[in-house]
Each structure stands twice: as structure tokens, then as C-alpha cells.
Image (cartoon, grey):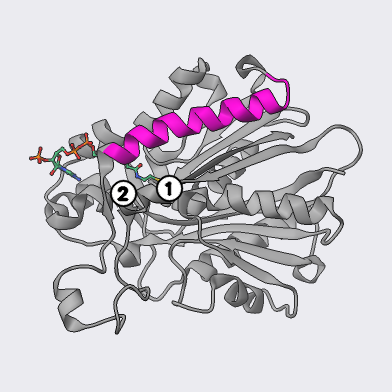
């Protein structure tokens, strides 16, 4: 038995933040951001909005498109790096906002690779017959964790808010569905992109001194991350293709995690893909971490870029380091 995508949904906050809006706050420029990252604008939520609120709106769309009600869901897998609270995870808040109860809510923390890790779990659950309707969520409220000053500009201009979801279920026996998932991690490079404060590395977890040192802000070795991302993503796509006896020319659409347009272009080049084979929307939304692939997937579907029977590839890379790919016969 295979797993298939029953529907998708996405939601981004209404507030659009253009590169020029960040110029004075972060001592940056539209030109720097566009040429280094491809980003023109992003969405940031108003204060008080939570990641589970964005996930709720995206889920309503996916349920509607699948002709399902929230009570039809058997499980929620919730991927985020920006949960509403330190604990519990975001899945239970989404469950309550959906007006349902008792179904399992599994939160996973695999950063920008969260959607692919989540897909591998949902796929296993569905294939073994454990659950029939799995809601897979990638939702992020990154704006609450951005250092809005020139010291935070390297990351601040990249990250953004949004949610993308998919509802997954057993496939008909027609060859369509999830063909494979491949997930990887290398903890030796965890320090390359991480946030020091908030966990138990410090005891007590939070002090004025730690805050004065700025340890609540994420840090990133941008160039190193860039190199790893542009190597690992094509590698994972090639693994998926080989595993399924497929070749790059058979890909209808590759949806790479929207980390940086230059990274997507390097992935495209290394795989020898044409422009029409790669879907990017980072220009409008920035890097929405675990939400970037399902948001791009939903838009690609709405635009008619993905049709029944098409071969769709996902590639992700993120903090951890983590990375992975998935191949889907749509
Ligand atoms: C972040 C990134 C765009 C920076 O691009 P880069 O070409 O590597 O730039 P550098 O880090 O070498 O910085 C170059 C200069 O720009 C400056 N700079 C950094 N951010 C800036 C910004 N937002 N605006 C203006 N200048 C900025 C730096 O301070 C540095 O100045 P200096 O030369 O005077 O020291 C790039 O490294 C990148 O995209 N990395 C991957 C990030 C990513 O995808 N992370 C998520 C993975 S899921």
C-alpha cells in the first residue's frame, strides 16, 4: 500500500514586509537581500498571532479541498521550529482549535527538513495501516524570534511566517502516491545554525545575564550552511531517483526547501534541470522553514504545475544538520 496526498493547504499572514521596510531597522538594502537570496518580500504576523493559528487556517483549506471534516482526521504531525510554547508542542493547540480531541499529536523538531521527516512518519503509519487520515503540518512564526537590529540582519532578512499542510491517506492501487522518503542528519554540525537559549544547556534556563549576551537569538554560519545545503539537497534527490529507477529528466516539478534562491539554483544546476522543472516562491515568502515545502506545493498545485500522474520531488535541508528528499507520483 502507498500513501497519497489527499489535499494541501496554506496560509500566510496578511502583513507583507518588503525588503525596503527592513532597510533602516537592520542596516540592509533591497539590493543586498535580492542579489544574495532572491527574496523580495515576506509575511510577518501581527503580535499575538501564533503558529497554531496559521496552521488552523491552512488546515481549514486542506480539509475543504479534501471534502473532509476535522473529526475525520486520525492523527496530526506538527513540524515547527517556532512552537507557541516551550511545551507542550503545537499539535495539541491546533487539535483544540480544530474542535477535536483524543487523536494523537506528534510534534517533530527537524527544522527546515521537518516536512520531509513528517512525511516519512505519516507514510509509515499509513502503509502499516495504523492511521488512514494524517494531517501533516509545517507551521512557523519566525518573526517573534528575529533580532530586529543590524546585529541580526544576516538571519533577520531570511526568515518569515507561514503554514503549509497536507492531508495524507492510503492510495488507490494505481501506482500513484509517495514512492520514497530519505531522511538524514549530521549532529556534528549542529552549531552551524542554532539557538543557544531556551533549552537546558543553561541552568537556570533563562537569566538576565544570558539575555544580555543575546543568546536568545539564533546564529548561523551562512557560508558553511550554504555549501552543505547546495550539496546535500541534490545528493538526496539523486538517491530518491536511483531508488525508484528514475532519472532527472522524468521530474515534472522539484520543490526544494525555500532557503535561498541561489541555493535552489545550484541544486537545479547540479541536477541538470530546466527552469520549468523547479518551483520557487521564496521571492514572495522568504524562508518559512518547515512550512516552505508545503506552501510551495500548494501554490504549484493551484497553478496547475502539478497534474495527476506527474513525478514530484521534494528536497529539504536545515539546522541539525538535517536533510532529505521524497519522491511522489502525484
Ligand atoms: C546568509 C547569506 C545570504 C549571506 O550571504 P554571503 O554572500 O555568504 O554573505 P556573508 O555572510 O559573507 O556577508 C557578506 C557581508 O554582508 C554583510 N551582511 C550580512 N547580512 C546582511 C544584510 N542583511 N544586509 C546587508 N549586509 C549584510 C555581512 O556583515 C558581511 O559584511 P562584511 O563583509 O563587512 O563582514 C548566505 O550565506 C546564505 O544564504 N546562507 C545560507 C542561509 C540559509 O539558507 N539558511 C537556512 C538554511 S535552512
Position in image of residue 218 (x %, y %): 29, 59
Q: Residue at x 16, y 49 (%)?
A: 23
Q: Is 330 left or right of 47, judged from the image as shown? A: right
Q: Residue at x 64, y 30 (%)?
A: 240
Q: Tag 1, which secondary structure? A: loop
Of 11 and 128, the residue lying toward us: 128
Q: Are marks 2 and 1 in contact (CB under 8 Å)?
A: yes
In the rendered image, the quadrant that contains the C terminus is: top right
Q: Tag 2, which secondary structure? A: helix
Q: Quadrant of residue 47?
A: bottom left
Q: Residue at x 41, y 46 (%)?
A: 285
Q: Which one is earlier in the sequence, the residue at label 2 or at label 1? A: 2
Mark 2 Cα within 10 Å, few/some/many (few <14, many 20+)? some
Magenta-colored span: 224-246
Position in image of residue 157 (x %, y %): 27, 49
For the stretch drawn in magenta, what is the main secondary structure? helix
Structural distance between the alpha carbons of marks 2 and 1: 8 Å
Q: Is 97 left or right of 222, judged from the image as shown? A: right
Checking the image for residue 321, the label placed there is: 1
Q: Quadrant of residue 2?
A: top right
Location of residue 12 with respect to 39 vertically, above or below: below
In the rendered image, the quadrant that contains the N terminus is: top right
Mark 1 Cα within 10 Å, few/some/many (few <14, many 20+)? many
Checking the image for residue 192, the label placed there is: 2
- Would the CB of label 1 be found within 8 Å of ligand 1? no
Of 197 and 298, the residue lying toward us: 197
Q: Is 90 left or right of 111, judged from the image as shown? A: right
Q: Can you see residue 266?
A: yes
Q: Is residue 228 magenta?
A: yes
Amino acid at each position: 500500500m502507498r500513501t497519497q496526498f489527499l489535499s494541501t493547504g496554506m496560509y500566510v499572514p496578511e502583513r507583507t514586509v518588503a525588503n525596503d521596510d527592513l532597510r533602516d531597522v537592520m542596516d540592509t538594502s533591497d539590493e543586498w537581500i535580492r542579489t544574495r537570496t532572491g527574496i523580495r518580500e515576506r509575511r510577518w504576523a501581527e503580535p499575538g498571532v501564533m503558529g497554531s493559528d496559521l496552521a488552523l487556517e491552512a488546515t481549514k483549506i486542506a480539509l475543504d479541498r479534501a471534502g473532509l471534516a476535522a473529526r475525520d482526521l486520525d492523527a496530526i504531525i506538527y513540524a515547527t521550529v517556532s512552537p507557541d510554547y516551550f511545551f507542550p508542542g503545537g499539535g495539541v493547540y491546533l487539535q483544540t482549535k480544530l474542535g477535536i480531541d483524543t487523536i494523537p499529536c506528534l510534534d517533530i523538531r527537524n527544522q527546515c527538513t521537518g516536512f520531509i521527516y513528517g512525511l516519512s512518519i505519516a507514510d509509515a503509519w499509513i502503509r502499516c495501516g495504523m492511521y488512514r487520515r494524517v494531517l501533516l503540518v509545517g507551521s512557523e512564526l519566525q518573526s517573534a524570534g528575529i533580532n530586529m537590529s543590524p546585529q541580526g540582519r544576516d538571519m533577520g532578512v531570511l526568515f518569515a511566517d507561514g503554514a503549509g499542510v497536507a492531508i495524507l491517506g492510503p492510495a488507490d492501487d494505481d501506482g500513484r502516491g509517495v514512492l520514497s522518503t530519505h531522511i538524514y542528519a549530521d549532529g556534528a554540525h549542529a552549531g552551524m545554525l542554532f539557538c543557544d537559549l531556551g533549552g537546558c544547556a543553561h541552568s537556570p534556563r533563562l537569566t538576565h545575564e544570558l539575555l544580555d549576551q543575546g543568546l536568545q537569538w539564533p546564529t548561523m554560519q551562512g557560508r558553511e550552511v550554504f555549501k552543505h545545503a547546495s550539496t546535500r539537497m541534490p545528493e538526496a534527490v539523486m538517491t530518491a531517483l536511483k531508488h525508484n529507477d528514475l532519472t532527472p529528466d522524468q521530474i515534472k516539478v522539484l520543490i526544494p526547501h525555500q532557503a535561498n534562491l541561489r541555493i535552489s539554483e545550484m541544486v537545479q544546476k547540479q541536477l541538470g534541470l530546466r527552469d520549468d522543472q523547479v518551483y520557487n516562491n521564496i521571492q514572495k515568502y522568504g524562508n518559512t522553514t518547515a512550512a516552505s515545502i508545503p506552501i510551495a506545493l500548494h501554490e504549484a498545485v493551484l497553478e496547475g504545475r502539478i497534474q495527476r500522474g506527474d513525478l514530484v520531488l521534494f528536497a529539504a535541508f536545515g539546522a541539525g544538520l538535517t536533510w532529505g528528499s521524497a519522491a511522489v507520483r502525484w
